[in-house]
Image: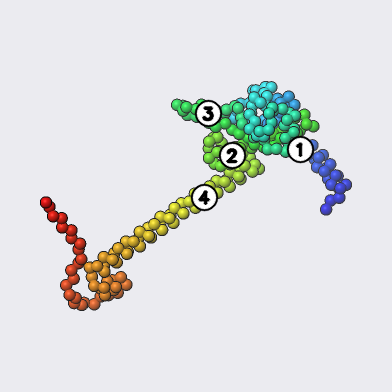
């Protein structure tokens, strides 16, 4: 257990060590490939590597946040400003990109020009004394189908991102539900076949007792051998309808 003085000293030591970490902006953009950092004027200062490369944002200067993304959540924010975002720091944010990347272009001849736009969800974190805000986020996907629709790859998401685990967990659950559904369908078909077989068995036994003596029919039904015996002539029963013509 650390006392308060020891904890403060340790925290100070960690801060000194962190100040000398060889982490530049390029490395940070690679670690958080979807982040967006903007200042009080809502001008984007830097973005993650994925957004920078796939959306060609390297040449875009003085790009406003509202020109890059559209706010989806929280719906209570009427106007996207630095002040309004600071009010909702403890709220989950979801943005949808207004730009499209070449990867999302559909095949020629399609009625649509692009695939579904990418949505990002995450948290807002003040940095630089509150003069800038960092949007730390991940793609808003929950299944492999969402990834395919966006033409993303698992490798596009860093391994430390819980979204990868969430997607794989949901995909495993979907596969398990599909297997359970197929199993239930197979069991239902087997029950139907069993019922049909029982009906055919009853019909066969009924015909057996109609055309052979009961002693022989019982032996056949039980699979026992039937010794040679003599019986009177058996006449099957037939129902004959005679229609007189006039």
Closer-to-camera residue (197/57):
197
How far apart are labels 1 and 2 at the CA level? 33 Å
Q: In front of the other: label 4 or label 3?
A: 4
Q: Position of residue 135 (x, y in %)?
A: 69, 34
CA gap, disc 4 to disc 1? 47 Å
What crowding class fits label 4: few (fewer than 14 Cα within 10 Å), some (14-19), or many (20 or more)?
A: few
Q: Are marks 2 and 3 in contact (CB under 8 Å)?
A: no
Please identify, in this view, whether the residue under mark 1 or under mark 2 is nearer the observer. Answer: 2
* 47 versus 168 height, above or below: above
The mark nearer the N terminus, 2 or 3, is 3
Q: Position of residue 224 (x, y in %)?
A: 30, 74
How far, Cα to Cα, is label 2 from label 4? 19 Å
Residue 209 location (% of width, % of height):
26, 69
The numbered dot on residue 21 is: 1
Q: Nearer the viewer, residue 141 or 33?
A: 141
- Answer with mark 1 or mark 2, whichever residue precedes in sequence: 1
């Amino acid at each position: 257990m650390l006392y308060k003085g020891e904890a403060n000293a340790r925290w100070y030591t960690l801060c000194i060590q962190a100040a000398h970490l060889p982490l530049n902006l390029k490395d940070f953009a690679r670690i958080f490939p979807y982040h967006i950092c903007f200042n009080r004027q809502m001008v984007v200062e830097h973005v993650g590597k994925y957004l920078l490369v796939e959306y060609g944002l390297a040449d875009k200067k003085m790009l406003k946040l509202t020109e890059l993304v559209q706010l989806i959540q929280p719906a209570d924010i009427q106007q996207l400003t630095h002040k309004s975002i600071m009010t909702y720091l403890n709220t989950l944010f979801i943005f949808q990109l207004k730009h499209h990347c070449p990867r999302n272009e559909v095949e020629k001849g399609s009625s649509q020009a692009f695939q579904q736009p990418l949505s990002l969800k995450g948290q807002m974190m003040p940095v630089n004394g509150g003069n800038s805000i960092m949007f730390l986020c991940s793609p808003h996907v929950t299944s492999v189908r969402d990834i395919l629709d966006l033409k993303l790859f698992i490798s596009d998401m860093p391994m430390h991102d819980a979204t990868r685990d969430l997607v794989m967990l949901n995909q495993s659950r979907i596969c398990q539900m599909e297997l359970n559904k197929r199993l239930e369908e197979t069991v239902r078909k087997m029950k139907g076949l069993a019922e049909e077989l029982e009906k055919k068995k009853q019909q066969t036994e009924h015909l057996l007792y109609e055309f052979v003596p009961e002693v022989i029919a019982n032996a056949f039904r039980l699979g026992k051998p039937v010794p040679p015996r003599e019986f009177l002539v058996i006449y099957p029963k037939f129902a004959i309808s005679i229609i007189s013509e006039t």
